[in-house]
Amino acid sequence: MTATATATPSSPLPLARVAARKPAGAAVGIPPRQIDFRFPRDSKRYFFDDNGFSTLFFATLSGFFPPGERFFMDSVRHYRDEISGERLKACISGFMGQEAVHGREHERLNELLSSRGIKVGMAERSVKRALGVLRRFSPAQQLACTIFMEHFTALFAEELLSNQRFRDKVDPQLLHLWVWHALEELEHKAVAYDVYEQVSGSYAHRVMAVPLTAVALVPAIVASMVYLLNADRELFNGAENRRGFRLLFAKRGFIARFMPRMGEFLRRDFHPDDHNTDALVKQWQEKLFGENGSLLEEFRNREALMN
Ligand SMILES: [Fe+2]
Ligand SMILES: [Fe+2]
């Protein structure tokens, strides 16, 4: 187990230790890892089960991530100077560092996909427009939308890291990016929520975040999928589209398995840490960044985080 893997947001450290170590996020279990992927040019075009529909769905999500991560960071950054408490400040620092690298590495994957003619730029543009709509609302409402989307990414991440059957279907060379991102989403899953509780905590804004986010993002997802499927001449490939749809949305499909838990967000006493994922986080910290971790080569600032 690395030194970066010893604490999670739900295992508070004494403030003296938080202050004594750098970077601050690492001391509270949210290490801002500098990960530098080199994607192999020979990985499969349809990296999810050789299926166009499901691959283009994940390509759409990858297109959404760079603008999405910026939206998350901006909505937290707006309140950063108002936050009290050394521990939460350190968590914010880790959150910012992790989300920034997620955006950068997804941009790199998006470049690879674009070079193969999968035009994820369309997904990026459509989500930018959708997030532009959300940016017209108050900072508190934007942060409420962020915590709703962070709830989605945490459930997505938990499913990805728990579901071997799903991971077996992903090209192993590209799977690294998705499991690393998923691990860090679980490490920082409560940060935006804790900021929200301290600066607003409005239940009305939290409830409103659900329809606002859905109305903004669902059309962007559908438009991007139709565009990408059409560009790949897959739009009318009924058999493959049905297979892809089943893989994701049918009863035991990847997304369908965790969607019922999206409703937890509307519980008045909801908190992301209610559902304990510490054991899963530790297991993957060890797998990816432990002594024989599979991503040690890509992990550029390991030494700095271990100080
Ligand atoms: Fe992220
Ligand atoms: Fe996140």
Image (cartoon, rainbow, N blue to C red):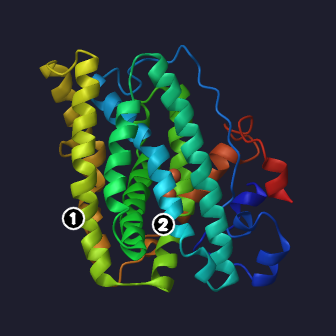
- The image quadrant where one finds the C terminus is bottom right
- Tell me how many marks there are: 2
Of tags 2 and 1, the one toward the viewer is 2
Q: Decide which of 132, 120 is in the foreground and name it.
A: 132
Instruction: Tell me if I can see residue 284 in this picture.
Output: no
Q: Which residue is mark 1?
A: 211
Query: Dot 2: what SS?
Result: helix
Does label 2 or label 1 sit earlier along the sequence? 2
**Separation of disc 2 and disc 1 at Cα?**
18 Å
Dot 2, how many residues are within 10 Å of its Cα: few (below 14), some (14-19), or many (20+)? many
Tell me the amino acid under the disc marked 1: Pro
Instruction: Tell me if I can see residue 214 in this picture.
Output: yes
- Res 41 quadrant in image: top right
Where residue 25 sits: x, y (%)?
Answer: 70, 65
Position of residue 154 relative to residue 193, above or below, is above
Q: Residue at x 36, y 66 (%)?
A: 145
Q: Residue at x 56, y 46 (%)?
A: 102
Q: Residue at x 43, y 46 (%)?
A: 160
Q: Decide which of 251, 263 is in the foreground and name it.
A: 263
Which numbered tag is attached to residue 75? 2
- Res 52 quadrant in image: top left
Where residue 29 sits: x, y (%)?
Answer: 67, 65
Horizontal arrangement in the rendering, residue 285 relative to residue 272 (left or right): right
